[in-house]
Amino acid sequence: MDANELLELLAGATTLALGGVFLGAATAKLERPSLFAATLRDLGVRSERLVRAGALLVPLSELGTGAALVLRPGAMVGVLAALTLALGFAGTGIVAMTRRHAVRCSCWGARSARSVLGIRQVAALPLWLLALALVARPGAGASWSAAQGLAVLAGLVLALLVAPRTVRVVRLAREVAAQRRAQIWLNARLLPGADA
């Protein structure tokens, strides 16, 4: 594998990662829009109309950006949309650092509700810029066809919709198993000879 092929492979992987990040963040926000709305209020958005609009438009922008990156790798529309969002994320981090109180992060919905906005969003900007420069380099758009991108996009969306539920089911199954083991242990101590 020569350097160009390696760079092309890296650009393709980065494109998929960026698309997945945007799609994942969007689905998490849309799953619990009240969390993101609360973050917008904490950032100082006063108008409830703007809060409701932002709680819908930001995740829809992320969905569109993720789809554009995966469907048309290297196309400027996806790259510019991702750049706009990355700058917005960093700007949000700066605004959050100027607030007199910690602003809860809801970038990943309920999964990130315990973290706060601030320096992480600002520090991530150079990484966003580096990833976007790699994805936007000349020739990066030839990695796969629109049909292949659509198949990958469908797979990413399916994975993002199924994965959180699968994690919940696994956690519940572990809890049930632990409760069952505790019940068996308790029965063995309190009722010797009783079947579990």
Image (cartoon, rainbow, N blue to C red):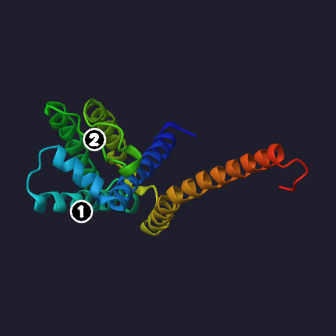
- Residue 42: x and y in percent read 18, 44
Residue position marked by numbered label 2 in the rendering: 104
- The residue closer to the viewer here, 151 or 141, is 151
- Residue 12: x and y in percent read 46, 49
Classify 154 as above or below 138: below
Question: Mark 1 near mark 2, Cβ–Cβ under 8 Å?
Answer: no
Q: Is residue 18 visible?
A: no
Classify 105 as above or below 100: below
- Residue 47: x and y in percent read 8, 56
Q: Residue at x 25, y 33 (%)?
A: 118
Q: Earlier in the sequence, mark 1 or mark 2?
A: 1
Instruction: Name the amino acid type tagged 1.
Output: Leu
Q: In this image, 22 relative to 122: left or right?
A: right
- The residue closer to the viewer here, 9 or 95, is 95
Q: In this image, 41 relative to 125: left or right?
A: left
Q: In this image, 130 relative to 167: left or right?
A: left
User: Which label sits on residue 124?
Assistant: none
Q: Is residue 150 visible?
A: yes
Instruction: Name the amino acid type tagged 2.
Output: Arg
Dot 1: what SS? helix
Residue position marked by numbered label 1 in the rendering: 56
Q: Residue at x 80, y 46 (%)?
A: 190
- The residue closer to the viewer here, 56 or 69, is 56
Q: Residue at x 37, y 61 (%)?
A: 31
Instruction: State the residue lying farthest toward the bottom.
Output: 147
Classify 146 as above or below 129: below
Dot 2: what SS? loop
